[in-house]
Amino acid sequence: MNSRGITNYLKGFAILFIPINHYINSYTSLAISGYANGMVALFFVLSGYGNYYALGKFEKINLGTILRFLAKRAVRIYPLYWLSLLLSYYLRGGQYTWEHILALPTSPAPGLYWFITYLVQCYLLAPFLYLLLEKLGSIRYTLVISVLWFLVYIVYPFTSLPFSRDMFIFRLLFLGHVLLFALGMALPSLIQEYGTRFRHKVFVAVFIAAFLLMVHLTHHPDLLFHRSGVYLALFYIAAAYFLCLFAFSSKPWLPLQRGLITLGIFSYSVYLFHLPYYKVLQKLKLIQRDNLQSVLYTLLLFPVLFLFCVLLEKANNALSSWVGSRVEAKVR
């Protein structure tokens, strides 16, 4: 596989777990929350990886190119996000403030939409991280980012700030999602300069296992011992990062390539619309709690959801390209 194929494969691998986890949490008596959140780590690393290339297309980074970059990112995420919000409001109720609708970085959106807010934070930081990376080089940049977050990780417990798993896995004050995104941005230049040192295909399997283990060990704050989910957070972040590093460097054979790559291409819309899909099936009485037949209906009708996602993403990609060209023409 080429780099794009690996990107989509890893997205497909991650998104495969998220609807399953949400179905189990919502429609069964099992309690295994936290696994969906754990898989989202790969999306932040891969987003950083992709945004490095998006910014690298510009001859130089200035106000005009930053506006063009942000405009394309906005059209990429907001129309589908707003449609999902509208469907959720109609099907599930609830209240969304303007802060939620705009996914403002200072006000996390509720439910699974928290991801959009933190993705917007990363997009706003991306041009400045890119400039820092170009100035320092991949090795020094990676060391600076890693040392900075390690110091925060060490100092944080001695402050009076909240000390919980969510703080350290992605969200709120620790900004773990920014760490994942920032490290992902360094991957292309790191691989270009030192990729031969990471061409050991066996380590892809090792870090897939390590990542899945860390997702499990951090899904609950006290699974092993008091605050174990917090203390293991850095190992979880490292496993996600090294999985992507070795996968992109060694380009290994991976199972179920065709299906997972296809799923990964449309992973964003699958993420946004799988809960409204469940709610529609529930209103049609095709989903009932703790019912095996409901699981079969959900799986059999999933191609309908996927086709819906494919059509939406293709239309949105066309809109994104058009807006990007218009903004570029105006800036120039």
Image (tube, rainbow, N blue to C red):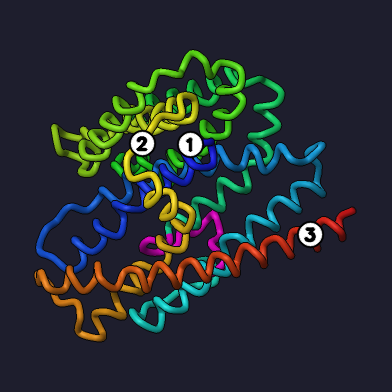
Q: Residue furthest right?
A: 332
Sequence-wise first label, 1 or 3 = 1
Q: Which residue is mark 2?
A: 254
Residue at 45% across, 42% down: 177
Contact check, label 2 and label 1, Cβ < 8 Å: yes
Where residue 81 sits in the image (x, y, percent)? 51, 67
Contact check, label 3 and label 2, Cβ < 8 Å: no
Residues under labels 3 and 2: Cα distance? 36 Å
Q: Secondary structure at mark 1?
A: loop
Closer-to-camera residue (145/54): 54
| Residue 225 in which image quadrant | top left
Closer to viewer: mark 3 or mark 2:
2
Residues under labels 1 and 3: Cα distance? 30 Å
Sequence-wise first label, 3 or 2 = 2
* Three-letter residue code for mark 2: Leu
Residue at 26% across, 85% down: 283
Whether residue 89 appears in magenta in the rendering, the answer is no
Residue 50 visible, this orientation: yes
- Could you classify mark 1 by the number of other residues whose Cα lies within 10 Å: few (under 14), some (14-19), or many (20 or more)? some
Where residue 9 sits in the image (x, y, percent)? 42, 44
Q: Main secondary structure of the magenta part?
A: loop
Q: Which mark is residue 325?
A: 3
215 relative to 180 in the view: left or right: left
- Could you classify mark 3 by the number of other residues whose Cα lies within 10 Å: few (under 14), some (14-19), or many (20 or more)? some
Q: Which residues are magenta?
A: 101-113
Where residue 284 sits in the image (x, y, percent)? 25, 86
Q: Secondary structure at mark 3?
A: helix
Closer to viewer: mark 1 or mark 3:
1
